[in-house]
Structures are given as structure tokens and as C-alpha cells.
Image (tube, rainbow, N blue to C red):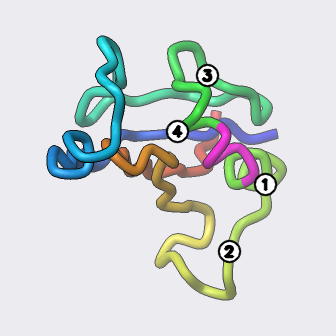
């Protein structure tokens, strides 16, 4: 199996939606711009948000077994995917790339 590099590419925050719809919470997201995670054997990397992992695990596992070319040419690099977590208030975009050892 290949390793996959998962890089935090973009982070957004929608304060208008947070104010209108979200209950106050003390801790929402630990991700940092440019942060890199390495998935071995298609497994969740240490420190990865469980919710973000749920959004990307199919793509990571497929890339780890040598797959790719999602949606018939969606990505310029067929061994990659750009996936966002499912937090509608603070979405984080991740670039997932199959890498060689």
C-alpha cells in the first residue's frame, strides 16, 4: 500500500452562520494552515480530526491501494483528491496525495 500525504490547504470560518445557528462551543478545530498528516495503509493519521477523516477516508483508502482518477479526470494529478471536512461553519480543505515511501 502507498502512503498518503494529507495537507491542510485552506480554512474558512462563517461567523454569520455561527452566530445564527451554532450553540457556543469552546473548542472547534485544531487544524493549522499547511499542516501535514501521513496516512499509512489507509489508516487515520495521528492528530487527524475524526469528522474530517469521515469526509476523506474513502479517497485515502482508494489512493493507498493505487487507485485514483476520481470522477473521470476531476483532478489534474489522478493520484490526488481535494476534500473538505463536513463542518459547515468552519470548513477545512485538504489535499490528499498518494506518495512513495
Q: Secondary structure at mark 1?
A: helix
61 displayed left or right of 99: right
Disc 4 to disc 3, C-alpha distance? 10 Å
Helix, strand, or loop for circle 2? loop
Element on which disc 4 rests: strand
Q: Which residue is mark 3?
A: 45
Q: Residue at x 44, y 44 (%)?
A: 87
- Label 2 and label 4: CA atoms lie apart by 17 Å
Q: Secondary structure at mark 3?
A: loop
- Is residue 69 placed above or below 81 in the rendered structure? below
| Residue linked to disc 2 | 70
Residue 65 in percent (x, y) is at: 83, 50
Callout 1–callout 2 Cβ contact below 8 Å: yes
Question: Residues in magenta?
Answer: 54-58
Alpha carbon separation for disc pair 1 and 3: 16 Å
Mark 1 vs mark 2, CA separation in Å: 9 Å
Mark 4–mark 1 distance (CA, rounded to whole Å): 13 Å
* Label number found at residue 77: none
Looking at this view, name the residue that lies furthest to the left: 15
Amino acid at each position: 500500500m502507498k502512503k498518503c500525504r494529507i495537507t491542510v490547504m485552506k480554512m474558512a470560518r462563517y461567523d454569520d452562520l455561527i452566530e445564527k445557528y451554532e450553540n457556543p462551543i469552546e473548542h472547534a478545530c485544531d487544524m493549522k494552515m499547511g499542516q501535514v498528516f501521513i496516512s499509512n495503509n489507509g489508516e487515520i493519521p495521528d492528530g487527524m480530526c475524526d469528522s474530517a477523516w469521515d469526509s476523506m477516508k474513502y479517497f485515502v483508502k482508494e489512493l493507498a491501494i493505487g487507485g485514483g482518477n476520481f470522477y473521470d479526470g476531476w483532478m489534474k494529478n489522478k493520484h490526488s483528491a481535494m476534500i473538505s471536512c463536513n463542518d459547515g461553519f468552519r470548513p477545512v480543505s485538504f489535499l490528499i496525495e498518494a506518495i512513495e515511501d
